[in-house]
Amino acid sequence: MSRWISRWSSTTRSASRWRTAAGAVVERALSPLPRVLCDKHKVLQIVLNLLANAKWALDEREGEGKRLAVRLARPAEDRVRIQIIDNGVGIDSALLTKIFQHGFTTRKGGHGFGLHSSALVARAMGGTLAAESEGPGHGATFTLEFPFRPAG
């Protein structure tokens, strides 16, 4: 899994930290993992949706010091965790229970399918998708966890 994410992220950068054209600092912390048996298309669907949301949150945030982090870890012997962490506009605590509902969006022109479908895909993989935020202006952390199944 870490090789797959590393390969994916190294298609644009080989360093573990870089600055985007828009000035955001991007960091990746990828724990070495053995090969994982999973549907990489489902994982990629979720991760790309979370990255797109993080980019939007950073674009909407005023000022300097924009940061995005991608973390890959194995928090338990039988679990894999991918986190997308940004210091963008954040999420009001009252909305944290609603953001995974079908059709719910806070974005002008949003459709409310991205997080909903990502949560459904995570569940279909035997995993979870969770969100945390200390509120508006404090960014957000999205955590995808799914079962670790060694490949081969």
Image: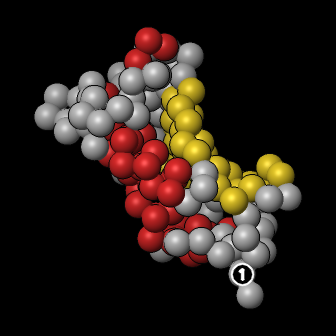
Report the residue that reaches farthest toward the left: 109
Compared to residue 146, the image places residue 99 above or below, namely: above
Front-lying residue, 128 or 49: 128
66 above or below 22? above
Can the viewer see residue 63 in this picture? Answer: no
Q: Which residue is painted at 56% across and 16% down in the image?
A: 134
- 89 up-or-down from 152: above or below: above
Q: Is residue 114 visible?
A: yes
Quarter of the figure with residue 141: top right
Crowd band around label 1 with a 10 angstrom C-alpha radius: few (<14), some (14–19), many (20+): few
Q: Nearer the viewer, residue 131 or 3?
A: 131
Give me the residue at 48% from left, 13% from top: 93
Q: Position of residue 49 (x, y in %)?
A: 38, 51
On the image, the x and y values in percent for residue 1 come to: 66, 70
Q: What amino acid type should be assigned to the residue bearing mark 1? A: Ala
> Is residue 142 depicted above or below 70 in this figure?
above
Q: Give the structural element (helix, strand or loop) at label 1.
A: loop
Image-based side of 142 in relation to 59, left or right: right
In the rendered image, the residue lying farthest to the bottom is 152
Quadrant the C terminus occupies: bottom right
Q: Give the colour scheme shown.
A: secondary structure
Residue at 73% from the left image edge and 64% from the top image edge: 148
Q: Position of residue 116 (x, y in %)?
A: 36, 42
Q: Residue at x 39, y 24 (%)?
A: 98
The residue tagged 1 is: 151
* Left or right of 82 in this view: 68: left
From this viewpoint, which residue is outermost toward the right?
77
Q: How many marks?
A: 1
Q: Is residue 18 left or right of residue 145?
A: left
